[in-house]
């Protein structure tokens, strides 16, 4: 695995509402926003600053990720649609602080041009310190500090949701949600993965951890975890693998080498193609759909949109419900003899087709946005 995003070559289904590709006038970098759906409310999704070999790869990533956000929000029952932003770095490019700032402002301007159809948040390569810079150019930004009316960094909530999902997955495979004595490989120790690893270690799991950044070794030592390469961690003989870096790591080739019983992690778009879900099922590996597992960040933002205002305790309670949603999806999949992906997608489709209530909530949330409230992450 490398730090340059590798993606499936085929273009995903183009069932999106909007795609805006704009070269930033300050930074000269490509800024991209894909709005997949606003059927349930404004599209929300993080902005990713990452290196791509080709502009087409960056566009494809935005298209794929925005689609996943639609299903993520729908399965979580939120009045939000799906969107995603990308700031494309070219291979070998290292930004000066000035150019990075320019790129963030350029991206903010791109978001503003969509007039609220897309609300941005943090994703890979972007931190909570970057959100106020993006906010210089657009009001459609989330993840600002709680003191500025935002719900702050979404990563702790995403990590809480992932831990809950790991427990639900273990319950489905091993008959108990208890992580004591379970072996777990966490791939990617960034904002979310580092917290997932810490939570699992605290819950008593034995860990293998990996990152392309050698600097993350220190965390492995602190947690008493075995440090490994990302490729080895994926093939490790463990109870569960938690992918918490980038997507596309599960494909026809890599699935053959897996030695885990289950997979549940934060990374978006873990499957290189949907039919990989069947390959995993055929190998007896339970895959927890990524867009269900990693919804904690967006669930947290949705609390911010409510008239009563943001409340972290409410957010945590709702994030914990991810475990129940996932257990229901596993049960529905087993009953219908379909994959968890098919069961989760069917639930998302049903929610997207819901008349009345969803439209009412979507309208209400648009009003909140129009009044200038700032929702946060995905
Ligand atoms: P991050 O940028 O903080 O961390 C990503 C980590 O993965 C970094 O430490 C990086 O060095 C490492 N990495 C990159 N390529 C790798 C590879 N090939 N093998 C191993 N490690 C690699 O990002 P994050 O916010 O922690 O997000 C991680 C994943 O979770 C992403 O796929 C993101 O889309 C998804 N996600 C994040 C949130 C959130 O709240 N931040 C919410 C939902 C989904």
Image (spheres, rainbow, N blue to C red):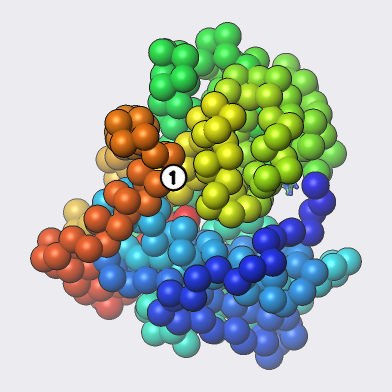
Q: How busy is the neighbourhood of tag 1: few (under 14 within 10 Å), some, or many (20 plus)?
A: many
Q: Quadrant of residue 53?
A: bottom right
The furthest residue to the right = 92
Report whether 174 appears left or right of 325: right
Q: Residue 125: give x, y in percent of width and height.
A: 67, 58
Residue 264 seen in render:
no
Q: Position of residue 12 (x, y in %)?
A: 55, 68
Question: In the picture shown, does residue 243 fall above or below 101?
Answer: above
Residue at the (54%, 84%) spot, across then down: 20
Q: Quadrant of residue 202?
A: top right
Q: Is residue 145 left or right of residue 29?
A: left
Vertical arrangement, residue 285 with respect to residue 29, above or below: above
Q: Residue at x 37, y 71 (%)?
A: 37
Q: Position of residue 328 (x, y in %)?
A: 30, 33
Residue behind mark 1: 341
Residue 253: tell me if it is visible.
yes
Q: How many marks?
A: 1
Q: Position of residue 311 (x, y in %)?
A: 29, 45
Observer-nearest of 225 and 11: 11
Please identify the residue farthest to the left as the structure is shown. Answer: 356
Kind of element beneath mark 1: helix
**Closest to the observer: 134 or 207?**
207
**In the rendered view, does 14 fall on the left or right side of 315?**
right
Q: Residue furthest top?
A: 181
Give me the residue at 30% from left, 31% from top: 335
Query: Quick one: 140 or 327, which is closer to the camera?
Result: 327
């Amino acid at each position: 695995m490398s730090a340059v995003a590798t993606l499936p070559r085929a273009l995903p289904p183009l069932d999106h509402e909007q795609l805006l590709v704009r070269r930033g006038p300050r930074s000269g970098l490509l800024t991209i926003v894909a709005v997949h759906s606003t059927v349930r409310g404004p599209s929300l999704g993080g902005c990713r600053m990452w290196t791509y070999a080709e502009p087409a790869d960056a566009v494809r990533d935005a298209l794929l990720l925005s689609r996943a956000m639609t299903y993520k929000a729908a399965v979580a029952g939120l009045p939000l649609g799906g969107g995603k932003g990308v700031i494309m770095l070219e291979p070998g490019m290292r930004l000066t602080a000035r150019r990075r700032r320019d790129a963030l402002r350029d991206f903010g301007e791109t978001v503003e041009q969509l007039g609220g159809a897309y609300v941005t948040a943090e994703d890979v390569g972007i931190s909570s310190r970057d959100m106020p810079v993006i906010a210089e150019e657009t009001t459609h930004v989330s993840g600002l500090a709680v003191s500025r009316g935002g719900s702050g960094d979404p990563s702790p909530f995403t990590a809480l949701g992932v831990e809950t999902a790991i427990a639900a997955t273990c319950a489905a495979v091993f008959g108990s949600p208890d992580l004591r004595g379970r072996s777990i490989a966490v791939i990617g120790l960034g904002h979310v993965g580092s917290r997932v690893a810490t939570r699992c270690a605290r819950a008593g799991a034995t860990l293998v951890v990996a990152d392309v950044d050698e600097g993350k070794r220190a965390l492995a030592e602190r947690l008493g975890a075995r440090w490994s390469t990302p490729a080895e961690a994926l093939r490790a003989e463990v109870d569960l693998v938690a992918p918490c870096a980038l997507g596309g790591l599960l494909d026809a080739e890599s699935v053959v080498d897996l030695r885990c019983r289950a997979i549940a992690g934060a990374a978006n778009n873990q499957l290189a193609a949907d039919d990989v879900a069947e390959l995993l099922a055929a190998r007896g590996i339970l895959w927890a759909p990524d867009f269900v597992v990693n919804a904690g960040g967006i669930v947290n933002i949705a609390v911010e949109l409510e008239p009563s205002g943001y409340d972290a305790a409410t957010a945590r309670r709702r994030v914990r419900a991810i475990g129940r949603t996932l257990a229901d999806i596993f049960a529905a999949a087993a009953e219908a003899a379909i994959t968890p992906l098919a069961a989760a997608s069917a639930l998302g489709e049903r929610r997207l087709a819901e008349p009345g209530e969803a439209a009412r909530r979507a309208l209400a949330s648009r009003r909140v946005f129009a009044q200038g409230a700032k929702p946060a992450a995905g």
